[in-house]
Image (tube, rainbow, N blue to C red):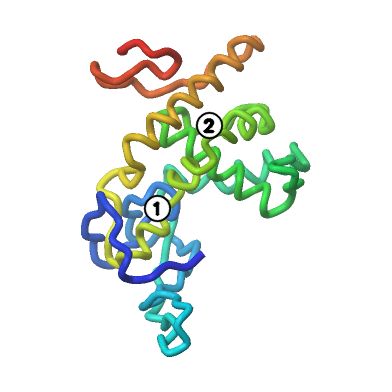
């Protein structure tokens, strides 16, 4: 995916000199973190008007993964190999596409306040989070928020995820916890909520 330089994401701060934003959670990575992606940035917008110049390549933004997110791709690889394939909207996902969906689901679980450790059953994880797949895309959109404004990053992990999306993700994470408890598995731990925030598993205040 690429982006245009005019897009203005929210909740971003200046990226410290010589450092890269995390490709998943969006925060600044430690100095010297390995580059995991080079994302092209374009200036201008596509247009149906033939007289309008096409978007021009303005450069590249380098992204890394912070220590907290560095193990997520490997975890997704292990889950993808264990699962083999997954059916979504009539399509059978496997290989890199399945891995990307698992990375997104793991991002969504952590953005919701859940544990970073992946659940034992990847099909359970994907099925429960399927209802808010757009929210998963938002949770993993740090790279697009970063490339929209080169030199910017999230002030803290997942700060680019808006409250509405975070609430939807927490609701689904709560259902995942209920499924696991019903099956006799350990629950997915969710981070404590503020006093006025709703419970992840029910409508009551925490």
Q: In the rendering, at what x and y percent does residue 53 appear?
A: 41, 87
Provide the residue designation for mark 1. Answer: 142
The outermost residue toward the front is 49
Secondary structure state at the residue bearing disc 2 = loop
Which residue corresponds to the image point at 37% horizontal and 65% vertical from the top-left?
A: 147
Mark sitting on residue 152: none
Q: Taking 111 as reference, is 137 above or below it?
A: below
Taking the image as shown, residue 107 lies to the left or right of residue 59, namely right
Q: In the rendering, at what x and y percent does residue 6 appear?
A: 31, 69
| Residue neighbourhood size for the residue with mark 2, other residues' Cα within 10 Å, grouped as few (<14), some (14–19), many (≥20) | some
Name the one closer to the observer, 99 or 116: 99
Q: Quadrant of residue 191?
A: top left
Question: In 3D space, how far apart are the residues under numbered discs 2 and 1 (Cα atoms)?
Answer: 20 Å
Taking the image as shown, residue 81 lies to the left or right of residue 168, namely right
Which residue corresponds to the image point at 45% horizontal and 62% vertical from the top-left?
A: 34
Which residue corresponds to the image point at 24% horizontal and 18% vertical from the top-left?
A: 196
């Amino acid at each position: 995916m690429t982006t245009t330089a005019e897009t203005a994401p929210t909740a971003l701060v200046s990226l410290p000199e010589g450092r890269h934003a995390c490709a998943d959670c969006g925060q600044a990575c430690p100095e010297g973190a390995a580059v995991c992606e080079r994302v092209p940035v374009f200036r201008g917008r596509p247009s149906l008007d033939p007289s309008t110049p096409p978007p021009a390549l303005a450069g590249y933004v380098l992204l890394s993964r912070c220590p907290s997110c560095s193990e997520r791709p490997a975890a997704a690889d292990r889950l993808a190999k264990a699962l083999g394939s997954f059916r979504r909207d009539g399509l059978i996902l496997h290989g890199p596409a399945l891995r990307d969906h698992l990375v997104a689901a793991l991002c969504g679980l952590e953005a919701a306040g859940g544990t970073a450790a992946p659940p034992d059953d990847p099909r359970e994880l994907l099925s429960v989070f399927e209802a808010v797949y757009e929210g998963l895309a938002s949770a993993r959109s740090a790279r697009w928020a970063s490339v929209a404004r080169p030199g910017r990053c999230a002030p803290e992990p997942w700060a680019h995820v808006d409250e509405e999306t975070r609430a939807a993700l927490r609701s689904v994470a709560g259902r995942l916890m209920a499924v696991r408890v019903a099956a006799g598995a350990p629950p997915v731990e969710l981070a404590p909520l503020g006093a006025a925030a709703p419970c992840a598993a029910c409508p009551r205040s925490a």
